[in-house]
Image: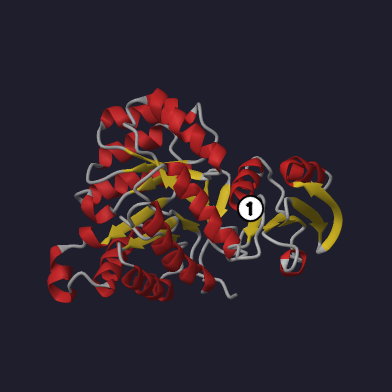
C-alpha cells in the first residue's frame, strides 16, 4: 500500500503523517470549564486507547482551564476554536498540543499573524478543519455543497498559513455522507503535502455511524490516505475509540491488542457460543499483545477455519476443544472453557 506522501507534524509525543502510525482520537463532550469532569472523561478514554483528545474552547474560561486539564492527563490535548484568535493565544499559553482553527475565520491578517507567531514559538501545529456545513457562501454559490467546494475552502485557509511561512499543518475535510467524503479527501491528497485527519462527521448512532466511518475511513486508509482518524458517533466516546482501533486492526494497519474472531454459528452448534464469545472478548480487553483468539461453534470447521488464530476454542456437545495454531491441545467441559482458555492465553502473552 503506497502512503500519501505527506509531511510529518509532531503533536505531543507523536509524529503524524509520512510513514508513522495512524493515530486514533476523539473529542470530549464535557464543558471544558469543568476541569474535574473533563479530566475524568479523558482518563476513561485513555483506558479505552484514545491517543489524542480534543476539547471545545468557546470562551476564555475554557481556554484558561487547559493548563489544569493538561497536568492531569497523559495524551496530547487539542483546542477546538472558532472565530476568536484570543482564545487560541490563551490555549497556547496554557500548553495546548495542537490548535484546530480556520485562519480565514478569525479576522484580520494581524490576528492570524499573532496566532502563527505563538504556534511557531512553541512548535504547536494547526489543524484546519472544514465541514460541509461551514463552507463559505461564495463557494457554495459557485459549486454547491460539494467536495470541490470543500476542497477550495480548505485550500483558501491553507494559503493564508503558507503565506506566513507556516507549514506545521494538518487538514480535515468532513462530510456526513460517505461518498462525497471519500471524493473530497482524494482530491485534497493530490493537492497538498500535509497530513490528513479522517472522519465522517455527524455519522449517527453507534451502529450506522460505525458502518459509515468504516466505509469512508477504511477506503481512504487502503489508498494510503490518512494520518489520524476519529469515528464520530452519537453515543459513548469509548465506542468511538474502540471502533477506530477496530477499523485499523481489520485493515492490518495497526496491530494493537487482541483480535477476536468467532463464527456466526449454524445448525451444528451445540454450545452457548454467543455467551462465551462475549465473555472472552471482555476478558481480553486488558491485554496489549496483538494475539488472535478464536471462538468457534463446532469442531467440524473450528480449528481448520481458524488455524491462523494463535489460540482458540471449538465447541461440541457441551465441551470445547482448545487449539493452538489449528492443533488441538486439550478438551474441556463447557463450564470450564473460559477459565481454561484464559489459562492457556497467559502462557503466550
Quarter of image, res 140: bottom left
Dot 1 falls on a residue whose secondary structure is helix
Residue at the location (58% across, 75% down)? 2
Depth check, front residue: 281 or 88 = 281
Residue at the location (29% across, 72% down)? 147
Quarter of image, res 55: top left
Q: Where is residue 119 in the image (x, y as percent from the top left)?
A: 41, 45
Tally the marks: 1
Depth check, front residue: 304 or 63 = 304
Extreme-right residue of the structure:
329
Q: What is the quadrant of the N terminus in the image?
A: bottom right
Depth check, front residue: 23 or 104 = 23
Q: Position of residue 71 (x, y in %)?
A: 50, 27
Depth check, front residue: 14 or 225 = 225
26 to the left or right of 341: left
Which residue is tagged 1? 273
Q: Position of residue 218 (x, y in %)?
A: 49, 67
From this view, report whether residue 192 is shown above or below residue 133: below
Residue at the location (42% across, 62% down)? 211
106 to the left or right of 41: left
Amino acid at each position: 500500500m503506497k502512503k500519501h506522501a505527506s509531511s510529518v507534524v509532531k503533536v505531543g509525543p507523536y509524529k503524524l503523517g509520512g510513514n508513522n502510525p495512524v493515530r486514533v482520537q476523539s473529542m470530549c463532550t464535557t464543558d471544558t470549564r469543568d476541569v474535574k469532569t473533563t479530566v475524568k472523561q479523558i482518563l476513561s478514554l485513555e483506558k479505552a486507547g484514545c491517543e489524542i483528545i480534543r476539547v471545545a474552547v468557546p470562551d476564555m474560561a475554557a481556554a484558561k482551564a487547559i493548563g489544569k486539564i493538561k497536568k492531569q492527563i497523559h495524551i496530547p490535548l487539542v483546542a477546538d476554536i472558532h472565530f476568536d484568535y484570543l482564545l487560541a493565544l490563551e490555549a497556547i499559553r496554557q500548553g495546548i498540543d495542537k490548535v484546530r482553527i480556520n485562519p480565514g475565520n478569525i479576522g484580520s491578517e494581524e490576528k492570524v499573524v499573532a496566532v502563527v507567531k505563538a504556534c511557531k514559538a512553541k512548535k504547536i501545529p494547526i489543524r484546519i478543519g472544514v465541514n460541509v456545513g461551514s463552507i463559505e457562501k461564495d463557494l457554495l454559490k459557485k459549486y454547491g455543497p460539494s467536495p470541490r467546494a470543500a476542497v477550495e475552502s480548505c485550500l483558501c485557509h491553507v494559503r493564508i498559513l503558507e503565506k506566513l511561512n507556516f507549514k506545521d499543518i494538518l487538514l480535515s475535510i468532513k462530510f456526513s455522507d460517505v461518498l462525497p467524503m471519500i471524493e473530497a479527501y482524494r482530491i485534497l491528497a493530490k493537492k497538498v503535502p500535509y497530513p490528513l485527519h479522517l472522519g465522517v462527521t455527524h455519522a449517527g448512532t453507534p451502529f450506522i455511524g460505525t458502518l459509515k466511518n468504516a466505509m469512508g475511513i477504511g477506503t481512504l486508509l487502503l489508498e494510503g490516505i490518512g494520518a489520524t482518524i476519529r469515528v464520530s458517533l452519537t453515543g459513548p466516546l469509548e465506542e468511538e475509540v474502540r471502533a477506530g482501533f477496530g477499523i485499523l486492526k481489520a485493515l492490518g494497519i495497526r496491530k494493537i491488542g487482541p483480535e477476536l474472531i468467532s463464527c456466526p454459528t449454524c445448525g451444528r452448534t451445540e454450545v452457548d457460543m454467543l455467551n462465551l464469545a462475549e465473555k472472552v472478548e471482555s476478558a481480553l480487553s486488558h491485554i496489549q499483545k496483538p494475539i488472535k483468539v478464536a471462538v468457534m461453534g463446532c469442531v467440524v470447521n473450528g480449528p481448520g477455519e481458524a488455524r491462523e488464530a494463535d489460540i482458540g476454542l471449538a465447541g461440541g456437545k457441551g465441551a470445547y476443544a482448545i487449539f493452538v495454531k489449528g492443533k488441538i491441545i486439550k478438551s474441556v467441559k463447557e463450564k470450564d472453557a473460559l477459565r481454561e482458555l484464559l489459562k492457556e492465553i497467559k502462557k503466550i502473552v
